């Protein structure tokens, strides 16, 4: 009898999550393909993910929202980490969320200048953690403000070997988008990243030495972008600049004297449909001032039922990664299934 009661109680406990999650929405996307890059071929994941999201009425005119999304490595059945995790309140005032969110800069200009599945680059941030975010939108415009706070700041800006409580506000972001009706949209984003770190920085310092160690920078980035429609054709353009200020601890004489050149970049791209058979294309070109001119070409074919076949080639023209190595050109054929 005791065993029967225990089993019934256990079954009752297990039934609670199904009731709780009944109003939530589960979703996901598995993306896996074969990539050829630098004379090597491999099976790779393409940013697969699954998540849960939903909302519930907290009081009259006030809604509580929540979302959790994590990565999936479809090539190895691994779980490399989280993507999104936040709770918030939404109402006539807009919405306030706390946690890890899509950044203000990406929602404004990044969503315009980064249409490639695998090899694009918007030069914005993407998802930001430790964030308090405010967003408001109507038919005319959308606004988002992000402030990122953390007491685990890795930068010892004052050189005393301790975390500085005054440095816990690590990043500020602003994004503003204006809708222009059927023509499209224009957007502006600004990011003040107070503590950006680079390992094995290959830029030249003012003594002519090649920096090959940990360096700390404050970066300020501004991007203006626009997307315009002509029938089924969409054209998008953008331009931006990132300014670097060295804030490495003064105890590190070499790193603290390093100079990193400001970076200017320009975007141009088109996307649209080919015929009426569910085939579309994306072309993206990016000019990084005094550096490289990479481009991306993608073709996507919808098979129906949430399945899509994608072909994408990225030509990076010798672009350098943060560790100083050259980014190789790459081509990928993949299958994506959304659920």
Image: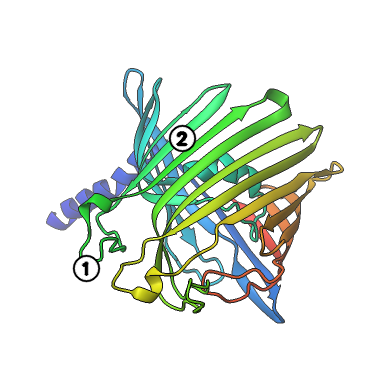
Residue 31: percent from the left, percent from the top? 61, 60
Element on which disc 2 rests? strand
Q: Nearer the viewer, residue 298 or 197?
A: 197
Residue under circle 2? 144
- Seen from the viewer's position, the closer of residues 33 and 294 is 294
Please tell me whether residue 4 is drawn above or below residue 222 in the rendered image.
below
Q: Determine contact: label 1, label 2, CB under 8 Å.
A: no
Residue 186 percent location from the top left of the image: 64, 33
Q: How many marks?
A: 2
Relative height, residue 192 to residue 137 (above, below): below
State left or right for residue 270 relative to residue 323.
right
**Residue pointed to by mark 1:** 161
Crowding at dot 2, Cα within 10 Å, few <14 / some 14-19 / many 20+, comes out as many
What is the distance, in whole Å, between disc 1 and disc 2 at their CAs? Answer: 35 Å
Q: Residue at x 50, y 37 (%)?
A: 175
* Residue positioned 50% across, 69% down in the render: 77
Identify the mark at residue 62; answer none if there is no mark: none
The relative height of residue 90 versus residue 224 in the rendered view (above or below) is above
Please provide percent x and percent y for residue 70: 44, 56
Question: Residue 316: x percent and y percent?
Answer: 69, 66
Dot 1: within a 10 Å radius of its alpha carbon, few (fewer than 14), some, or many (20 or more) residues?
few
Q: Is residue 24 visible?
A: no
Q: In the rendered image, which quarter is residue 87 located in?
A: top left
Q: Quadrant of the N terminus?
A: bottom left
* Quarter residue 270 falls in: top right
Of the residues under marks 1 and 2, which one precedes in the sequence?
Answer: 2
- The mark closer to the camera, 1 or 2, is 1
Taking the view exactly as shown, the residue that stands out farthest to the top is: 60
Residue positioned most to the front: 207
């Amino acid at each position: 009898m005791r065993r029967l009661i225990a089993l019934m109680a256990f079954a009752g406990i297990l039934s609670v999550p199904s009731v709780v999650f009944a109003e939530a929405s589960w979703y996901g996307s598995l993306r896996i393909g074969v990539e050829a890059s630098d004379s090597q071929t491999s099976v790779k994941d393409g940013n697969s993910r699954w998540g849960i999201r939903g909302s519930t009425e907290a009081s009259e005119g006030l809604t509580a929202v929540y979302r959790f999304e994590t990565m999936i490595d479809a090539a190895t059945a691994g779980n490399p980490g989280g993507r999104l995790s936040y709770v918030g309140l939404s109402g006539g005032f807009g919405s306030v969320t706390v946690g890890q969110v899509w950044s203000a800069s990406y929602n404004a200009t990044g969503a315009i200048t980064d249409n490639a599945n695998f090899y694009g680059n918007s030069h914005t941030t993407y998802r930001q953690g430790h964030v308090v975010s405010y967003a408001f939108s109507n038919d005319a415009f959308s606004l988002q403000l992000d402030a990122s706070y953390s007491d685990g700041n890795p930068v010892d800006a004052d050189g005393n070997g301790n975390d500085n409580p005054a440095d816990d506000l690590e990043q500020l972001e602003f994004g503003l988008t204006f809708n222009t009706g059927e023509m499209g949209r224009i957007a502006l984003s600004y990011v003040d990243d107070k503590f950006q770190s680079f390992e094995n920085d290959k830029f030249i310092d003012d003594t002519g030495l090649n920096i090959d160690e940990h360096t700390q920078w404050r970066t300020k980035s501004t991007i203006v972008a626009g997307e315009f429609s002509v029938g089924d054709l969409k054209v998008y353009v953008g331009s931006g600049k990132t300014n670097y200020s060295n804030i490495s601890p003064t105890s590190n004489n070499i790193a603290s004297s390093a100079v990193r050149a400001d970076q200017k970049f320009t975007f141009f791209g088109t996307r649209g449909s080919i015929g009426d058979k569910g085939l579309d294309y994306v072309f993206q070109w990016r000019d990084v001032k005094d550096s490289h001119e990479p481009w991306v070409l993608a073709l996507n074919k919808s098979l129906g039922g949430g399945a899509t076949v994608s072909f994408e080639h990225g030509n990076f023209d010798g672009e350098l990664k943060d560790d100083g190595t050259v980014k190789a050109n790459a081509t990928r054929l993949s299958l994506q299934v959304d659920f």
